[in-house]
Image (cartoon, rainbow, N blue to C red):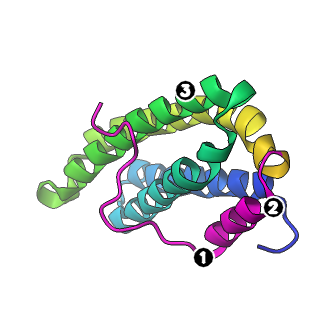
């Protein structure tokens, strides 16, 4: 993971996800479509949610971060359900309806922007300062090359 701190690596993943959705929307607006690019961005986002819920949140969810983590997990559920909605539209005839894809992608982007406004300044600093060394190393290794288990869904996906 180079010399980058954990919070910067996590924020970089946010930027990668946002850029992937943005590129898809730009191409859609130019009367093109790259469903593979959107699917890739959604896969990166799902993996990112996994690493947060399984590796980052448990050790910091006590004390001062408890309510913020609870809010992040609730937000993940809404984000996850929106991604599921995009998957359904993409699976439709002709890779889905462009207007619906645009609307759901824009909704996902808005959800992510609101979510990241809290996560980046409140939660991510704890990745740099609030994790025991072995958990920080595990998180760094996962950011570098970890894979989300097949079939995993976030805690609030069904709510």
Residue 124 percent coordinates (x, y): 74, 43
Which label sits in the foreground, 2 or 1? 2
Residue 69 percent coordinates (x, y): 60, 32
Q: Quadrant of the N terminus?
A: bottom right
Secondary structure of residue under mark 3: helix
Whether label 2 touches label 1, CB < 8 Å: no
Q: Which residue is mark 2?
A: 133
Q: Which residue is mark 1?
A: 145
Residue range corresponding to the magenta coloring: 130-159
The local crowd at label 1, few if under 14, some if 14 to 19, many if 20 or more residues have their Cα within 10 Å, is: few
Q: Earlier in the sequence, mark 2 or mark 1?
A: 2
Mark linked to residue 71 = 3
Residue 76 horizontal side relative to residue 83, left or right: right
Q: Quadrant of the C terminus?
A: top left
Residue 100 percent coordinates (x, y): 27, 39
The local crowd at label 2, few if under 14, some if 14 to 19, many if 20 or more residues have their Cα within 10 Å, is: few
Residue 39 horizontal side relative to residue 73, left or right: left
What is the CA distance from the residue labelled 2 to the residue labelled 1? 18 Å
> Magenta span has 140?
yes
What is the CA distance from the residue labelled 1 to the residue labelled 3? 27 Å
Q: Earlier in the sequence, mark 2 or mark 3?
A: 3
Q: Quadrant of residue 106?
A: top left
């Amino acid at each position: 993971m180079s010399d980058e701190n954990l919070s910067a690596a996590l924020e970089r993943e946010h930027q990668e996800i946002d850029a992937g959705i943005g590129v898809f929307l730009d191409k859609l607006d130019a009367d093109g479509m790259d469903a593979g690019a959107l699917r890739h961005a959604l896969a990166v986002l799902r993996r990112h949610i996994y690493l947060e819920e399984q590796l980052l949140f448990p050790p910091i969810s006590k004390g001062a971060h408890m309510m913020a983590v609870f809010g992040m997990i609730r937000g993940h559920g809404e984000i996850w359900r929106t991604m599921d909605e995009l998957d359904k539209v993409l699976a439709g005839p002709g890779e889905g309806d462009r207007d619906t894809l645009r609307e759901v992608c824009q909704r996902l982007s808005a959800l992510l922007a609101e979510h990241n406004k809290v996560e980046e300044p409140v939660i991510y600093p704890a990745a740099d300062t609030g994790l025991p060394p072995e958990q920080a190393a595990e998180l760094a290794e996962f950011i570098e090359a970890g894979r989300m288990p097949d079939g995993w869904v976030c805690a609030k996906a069904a709510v």
